[in-house]
Amino acid sequence: MEKAAQLKRGISRQFSTGSLRRTLSRQFSRQSSLDPRRTNLRFSFGRQSSLDPIRRSPVNDELSVPENLDSTMQMLFMACRGDVKGVEDLLNEGTDVNSIDLDGRTALHIAACEGQIEVVKLLLSRKANIDARDRWGSTAAADAKYYGNVEIYNILKARGAKTPKIRKTPMAVANPREVPEYELNPLELQVRKSDGITKGSYQVAKWNGTKVSVKILDKDSYSDPDSINAFKHELTLLEKVRHPNVVQFVGAVTQNIPMMIVSEYHPKGDLGSYLQKKGRLSLSKALRYALDIARGMNYLHECKPDPVIHCDLKPKNILLDSGGQLKVAGFGLLRLSKMSPDKVKLAQSGSRIDASNVYMAPEVYRDELFDRSVDSFSFGLILYEMIEGVQPFHPKPPEEAIKMICLEGKRPPFKSKSRSYPPDLKELIEECWNPEPVVRPIFSEVIVRLDKIVVHCSKQAWWKDTFKLPWK
């Protein structure tokens, strides 16, 4: 009786197609609307979809139909129990034969899973959609075949039912319970081509009505171990980070082709495009942006058990959200090999440096051992560009500029007026791009020094000429 009561409570909170479901059972703290780590209790009819990542135990045969169910849920429950008369009565009363539950499963799916052949025949006589797919893409025929209900499978096949082909991915798991909790249903993603803010393998999509950015693994990469390992590495890092100044990971598709990484969408694009359009930033905005970057990087460097070294920090990998806040992205794209407790090196395979990245630290460019200070080096050049309004050594081509920085030890000149550099700011930039890694400040120190500069500028009305009140 206690089990029946629990089942009744679970079902009473579910609704038919087009309505909302309430979040139940497991206790969790309030999370972002984009956080994939949210769980919802579903009513288990018995055998679940053949493609459901987590299949639950069958219901107790002694249980009767719970009260307070809408007609759709009643019909699905009766299909599970094999109650032909009950299903027929509901259909006669006007219940849609193709009504679905929260997982997109029809009564035909349920009956095919449970081997209820008479219910299947009844539903087919009432023109049930023989090829309806649930949220995992499974059909009634696929479910019947999976659970060994041969007679039902043959009936459905004789009527032209289709069995979806299952293409295994390099990350496919044998045990459904091993499917990672970040796994997303690809049917919930509506992908369209990016309109310019993210290029290459990134596209814009809608996930449950929310715009997201989707990185799709190229079809030629499935047979390339290096590409798969790089994909896994990026996924591992993205999954564990959560910070206001770090791009937010939404989830991933690893059990279906194409494999995808889904993150939050930033309609304002990246800092590189913004600087190209705006040029030199006001001191107040440059400092605010610098603090955003420093906070995000400090979080990554303080991750346990090992710091996340970006190694590819550049304006193109810093995104601008709708509220004007910067978020660090693009970490995890380069695979690193740990050589000592605090030293790493680019992995021999799967890591390709961008020879035109003028923000790269010399030790990375020269393929030497390095530590997290390489990100401080990149930060110094980014801060320089925000204040000066041009890339280092502009208008020289990036390939030439990076050689001047990394091989010749040169640094770009400060050309802006002295008022653009309040006390300690120029010194901070010079320390960040110092050729000696031990001289470069860590990001916790960078934050403290930037905060002091902001306070000093506020007291001295340093940016009063450029600051505008929002109502003027």
Image (tube, helix red, strand yellow):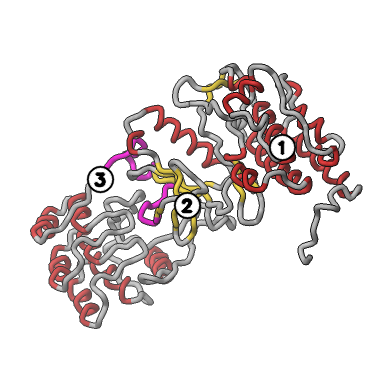
Tell me which amino acid carries mark 1. Leu
Point out which mark residue 40 bears.
none
Callout 1: SS: helix
Q: Which residue is mark 2?
A: 195
- Vertical placement of 157 versus 129: above or below? above
Q: How many labels, in total?
A: 3
Check if residue 215 falls in the magenta segment. Answer: no
Q: Which residue is mark 1?
A: 383
Point out which mark residue 166 bears.
3
Tell me which amino acid carries mark 2. Asp
Q: Nearer the viewer, residue 437 or 49?
A: 437
- Vertical placement of 32 versus 308: above or below? below
Callout 3: SS: loop
Q: From mark 1 to mark 3, how far is it between C-alphas?
A: 49 Å
Q: What type of secondary structure mainly makes up the magenta span?
A: loop
Residue 460: percent from the left, percent from the top? 91, 47
Q: Nearer the viewer, residue 450 or 52?
A: 450
Tell me which amino acid carries mark 3. Ile
Q: Residue furthest bottom?
A: 93
Callout 2: SS: loop
Start and end of the magenta stretch? 167-190
In the figure, is residue 232 to the left or right of 285? Answer: left
